[in-house]
Image (cartoon, helix red, strand yellow):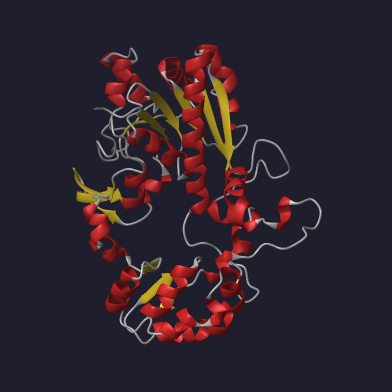
Amino acid sequence: MPGPLSDVTILDLTSVISGPLATSILGDQGARVIKVESPNGDSMRMAGAINGGVSSLFSSINRNKESIALDLRKPEAIEIVNKIAARADICIQNYRPGVVEKLGIGYDDLKKINPELIYASISGVGAEGPYSRRRVYDPVIQAYAGFASAQTTNGEPGLIKMMICDKVTSLTMAQAITAALYDRKNTGKGQHVEVSMLEASLYFIWPDCMLDQSFVDKPDSEGGDLTSLYQTVPTQDGHITFMTLQLDEFHGLARAVGKPEWAEDPRFQELMSMYAHYSEIYQELLVQIGTWETAPLAERLTSEDVPFGVVLDPDNILLDPQIQAHQVIKTFEDSMAGSMRHVNRSSRFSSHNTGIRSPAPRLSEHAKTILAEFGYSKTDIKPLQSAGVIL
């Protein structure tokens, strides 16, 4: 069956990462996504690995979409946007605050055309405040939202080497849009949904990285930092990571690495005592792990039911038996790039077939069919092309 959002049409005015990934998630779940790009195209079309003129990054966050390129500085292009918005369920944009209002396609403009429209806005830090007009990218939000501070090692903060705040924002917006759709089903009314990268990222990081800040007054006791145990450990031929929070997990780890006496040690017979004395044997534990090759150690850890993971590089992720058994990756054909593969979907539905239906579109690939659908004849389209309104 089609995806659960197969009766939803999205007017996508977003570019770069946070907006396109949000609409890609909804597209994977069946929504029709009409992506409006500038005549130069989304800048991510030239990001990531390139094969046959196709960007790996753009492809992964713009699949299942249709593309039309419009010059939104021209009133004829705004008229086209208005016609699509009049029949759309959702309009989503991630321009800096104030831009869409100047263009005449802000929430107040489009709700007059379509009162049931859900208008979704992504911003860097929010529509108000001293930073609201600043340009921001993922590393900037990592700095302001505490992600860089949380990576501090030897007194030096660091950045997570991925677009974590962009992606957190995408997930947050996709869920918020779905909530707004549910609300519209009950009320019959559209509304403005706003998500800022800063707010979404703070919401994400707060539970485990802002422990003391949850209390206005100084807490009676400081929370333990479980992430201090987050580290990779070298083996003879690779790296693993592990975590033992329960007594039986620690006892299994001791036996697996060849230290069964630790499982009988009085210090490690009660949970709180284990936590108190864990640091006394930790360095020796790391040395023991370093004496093993990865494969036999993984077998022993598995047999002892110890939570662990083998550190995999990108090539080996594709070969991992769990990834293959659960059919996480889908291979498909792109007319320019040839065979490509992506993670097929972020969630599974027992009543719907979701995931990749079509590769990312060429720039303005669907312009003529979209315009025809919204009332433009061939004779209407030619002068629009000549005037640079559409590509």
The N terminus sits in image quarter: top left
Taking the image as shown, residue 384 lies to the left or right of residue 114, namely left
Taking the spot 53% from the left edge, 84% from the top edge, the residue there is: 281
Taking the spot 45% from the left edge, 45% from the top edge, the residue there is: 17
Taking the image as shown, residue 148 lies to the left or right of residue 65, namely right
Query: Is residue 353 in sight in this rendering?
Result: yes
Closest to the observer, 57 or 240? 240
Is residue 343 depicted above or below 188 in this figure?
Answer: below
Taking the image as shown, residue 372 lies to the left or right of residue 121, namely left
Q: To which quarter of the image does residue 323 belong?
A: bottom left
Q: To which quarter of the image does residue 308 belong?
A: bottom left
Taking the image as shown, residue 278 lies to the left or right of residue 83, namely right
Closest to the observer, 384 or 377? 377
Closest to the observer, 358 or 77? 358
Q: State the image coordinates of residue 333 (x, y, percent, origin top left).
A: 18, 45
Q: State the image coordinates of residue 273 (x, y, percent, origin top left).
A: 60, 74
